Image: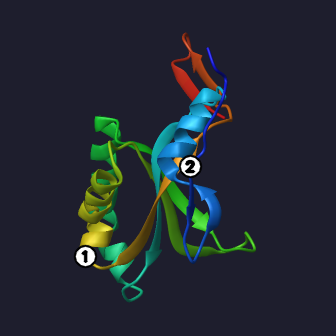
Amino acid sequence: MSNNIDIIFIHTSEVSSMPAWVAYKEVARKRGALALELFAVESVPAGGPASVPENLEKHLAYQRELESKGTLVLAGPVSNAAGDMMEGAGLIIYRAASLAEARAIADADPMHASGARTYSLRRWLINEGSLTISVGLSTKTVSLS
């Protein structure tokens, strides 16, 4: 059995000598990485100051629906670059079968559908890391760290 790993490189005006996504995903798997593909949405305010609060209840209901279906992995606000202020930006991580499916999910978010926020969407390959989940059986508590 050969342990050779082939990488297919692409060349565009923005990125040179980087492997194609699918090729890299296979390389990551072959080297033993998790290679779990998720989809990352950076959502930022686009409308007037009142547009986000006006859509918040519907947005949160949509997020709960996605969570119950197993589509929403993580979501929440992010700070400004200095880390000391809220900017109204958020990060949302989806499970989806494809980039097109992830885009449809993001498009259907009431914040995006109403124009209160715009978003950028990227594939995210999870290779390393850890999560700790603690379940207290007698206390009926769960914590994630």
Q: Which residue is outermost to the bottom?
A: 48
Q: Which residue is outermost to the top?
A: 138
Give amino acid for label 2.
Ile
The reply to whether callout 1 and callout 2 are in contact (CB within 8 Å) is no
Q: Could you classify mark 2 by the number of other residues whose Cα lies within 10 Å: few (under 14), some (14-19), or many (20 or more)?
A: some
- Which quadrant would the N terminus be assigned to in this image? top right
Q: Is residue 93 above or below residue 36?
A: below
Residue 74 appears in the rendering = no
Q: Could you classify mark 1 by the number of other residues whose Cα lies within 10 Å: few (under 14), some (14-19), or many (20 or more)?
A: some
Q: Residue at x 25, y 58 (%)?
A: 104
Q: Quadrant of residue 126?
A: top right
Q: Is residue 116 above or below residue 130?
A: below
Q: Quadrant of residue 29?
A: top right
Residue to which mark 1 is pinned:
114
Residue 76 % position (x, y): 51, 56
- Residue at disc 2, secondary structure: loop
Viewer-nearest of discs 1 and 2: 2
- Residue at disc 1, secondary structure: loop
Residue to which mark 2 is pinned:
8
Q: Earlier in the sequence, mark 1 or mark 2?
A: 2
Give amino acid for label 1.
Ser
Q: Is residue 37 left or right of residue 18?
A: left
Residue 28 % position (x, y): 61, 36
Q: Nearer the viewer, residue 117 or 21?
A: 21
- Which quadrant would the C terminus be assigned to in this image? top right
Q: Is residue 27 left or right of residue 109?
A: right
